[in-house]
Amino acid sequence: MSTVVAYERPVEVWTPPLDAEGLMTILERFKEWTPLDVEKIFDDLDTAIGIQPPSASTTAALIERLHSHLKQLSDIAVADDRRQPTTQMDGLVKRGLSLRKECLPAADSRAAPPQSTAPVHQSPTGGCAAETRGVHDPTRMPGRGVPGGHRLHHHRSLHQTSVALYGNFESPGDGMLTDDLKDIAARVAALHGQSEGEGLAFTAAPVLALGTFERVGSNWLSDSLRAGMPQHNEPFRQQLSRKHPTSPRSRGPLELTGGAWLGDLERHHLACALSDLYGDPRHLVKETNLFFSTDTTLTLLPHSPVMVLTRAPVGIASSFARGRLWSRWGYGERYAQVAVTAHSARWRNEFESLLPQDDPEEPIALGRLIAVNALLLARALDGRAHTVVSYEQHVKDPAGTLGRIADVLEVHLPAPGQPGTTSPAAADATFATNGNKNELIADLDRRTAELVSEHANATLSRAAQTLDPTIIATAAEWLDGDDLYELCEPVARFRRAARPAAAVQKVPLPAYCPVNRVSWRNTLVTNGEMADLLTMLHAAGLPNTQSGTNLLLCPMAHERGGRLHFDPKQRRWLVSAGYEAHPAYWVTWVGAAAMAAWSGARLPTRAEALDATVGAPPPHNCGYAVGDASSVVEPGRGSGQVHHLVGNLQIWCHDGPAQNPARAEQRFLFGAAWNTPGTRGAIEAERSRYLLGSSRGVGVRLVRDPDTTQATGLGAWELAQRVNEWIDDLGVPDRSLGEQDRRLVTALTAAAASS
């Protein structure tokens, strides 16, 4: 008797689109969701404009409901990017915005229209003045002003623009920059008292710590000096988008041919970013791998002392191999981009032969890149004083090296071993500096070490045909020391996960917990929430990146710490898998303020943060204890408590320091982060950044008071129009950096700036 085997249809195994954490997040959002109730909207409209005026006792509640309806409708209008707002909808918005500018006659108390959150000011003539708001135009490129993306209004000469922003005086130096950049550098320096005869308060130019490459001890230096100097980690390479003409990551070669070619937003952003680097005490700016933008950066900061951080190529290659950084950080693409620039008209005579476009293997390409960056740095510093800090020397004598640096910079540093100077090993040690090294060991096989060293030296030798011998000698001295390393054959080693595996944690629904005089949201703003807002603002006509400027968030590759990524095909912002419930960082103050306005909340003031954290428990995540920000859920705390009141991330504040009103506005940062010390002194230390600045250690915490509720929230559509109008108005003459920034602050917070 034969057995019949049933035919099994081949079926592809289904892979769920979300993991358990993602599904839980979706479930919580469904619980929080309030469906649109059209009948309630019409009932409230009938109450507001019906025959019988609303009673005084019900007016306030009616206004709050109308605000809630307006925000919900605004968000719905842009929630589906397949259905753009119609011409009729756009016309209604224009009518509504014009009505909001009108003053309500004092004698007519019959109507109670919804109050705008935008401040209304009395003009000197007694009339009513209000901030104008932009309106969506389907034919208009966001933030550009006219169809096609070209600005046809507010054009004026470079000289007029610069005088309006900074005042009228000559720019110093003969750096190889366009007229725009020379002008910005000189006027920002003058705002900080760096030019004679200006009569402005002096603020020191920053110290520049420039690396001959990555992995040269720059993180060690930065963290060692943190107690005495505010820090800026690669502001030119990280904060400027690839599309910004001065970005070190620009795909296109920088042709320095003179002329005014920076747009209004590019100029404003660069000026504010540059101004942010000045301060008292003096700030430290760390930059590595500037390549062909090295001379640009140095000329933008002509008064800055310079430290050169060096390391032998074999040591750099060892660090790259241990962390698999060539592939993780996309150095194959980086080599191609730098090689394209080397072959451009501006640079080909000197550097074309040094970077052949021959698709080299990793050790060869790495050796070439190390040598070229060192040559470019030596070339740009030729004739300019600088201090050399050798990685090999600081490994042999860390205390002595740090002491000499402190003496040169005239800063006081805590003695080794003081509280806050050590912490446990990080789970993800890519950026950690809390491990001690006392030996020069290279985890490389002999062939790899020889290839890196050979091609670095060969590149220096080829440079003798086109570059000055003193430049080559300087670069060679910086790259000396391969023989100091002991080679150790790499072996397969156990790699710890970026964070220990943990059970899925339920993220509590957003709630506000009373803490002294205000109510604090129980959790930091998550990546999932930030992605939702960024997607809706993009659909409403406000892309995050415009003219090379990141307005709301600095997008970084996942391996560089980025967790939010824009998908151009889906036209949506996505979160790296597993990070939906982690706090959003790399957020600018503009992005934080937009999230607060969208949520019917605000950012806390520094005084409120100080008051709320008195007696708070020690930070749960600080000093590289984990190696990254952890979940917004703090172990042991419930939904009715504030999680990570200090620790995990520092937070943006609503207010900023008092300063010269012509300077770019700044806003305070507060607290401790995963990568900063958690001592009380470090938590309370006063620090601030400019409005478009961002960091991997700074996120968003929301608070509410009686004047900020869910009903006062702004829809994504209106937020987009407010920011776009600010961009369109940047070309208006006779406004300083500070005045331009305060207009943006007012648009997002409906409150006066703190300066």
Image (cartoon, grey):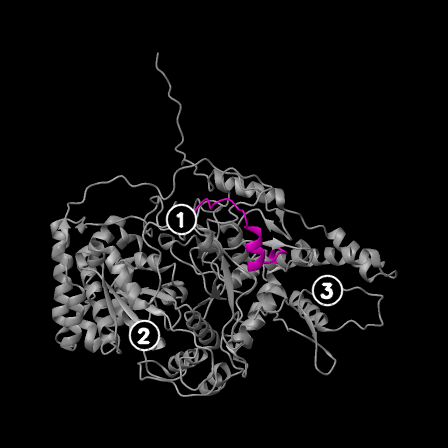
Residue 167 sits above or below residue 591 on the image? below
Q: Residue furthest top?
A: 1
Q: Which residue is mark 3?
A: 115
The answer to whether 402 appears left or right of 446 in the picture is right
Q: Secondary structure at mark 2?
A: helix
Residue 389 sits above or below residue 24 on the image? below
- Residue 145 in view in this figure: no
Q: Is residue 621 one of those drawn in magenta?
A: yes
Q: Where does the magenta region start and end?
A: 598-623
Q: Residue at x 57, y 62 (%)?
A: 654
Q: CA distance from mark 2 to mark 1?
A: 32 Å
Q: Which residue is mark 2?
A: 298
Q: Residue at x 39, y 28 (%)?
A: 8
Q: Residue at x 48, y 84 (%)?
A: 161
State the quadrant of the N terminus: top left
| Three-letter code for the amino acid on which mark 2 is drawn | Leu
Q: Secondary structure at mark 1?
A: loop
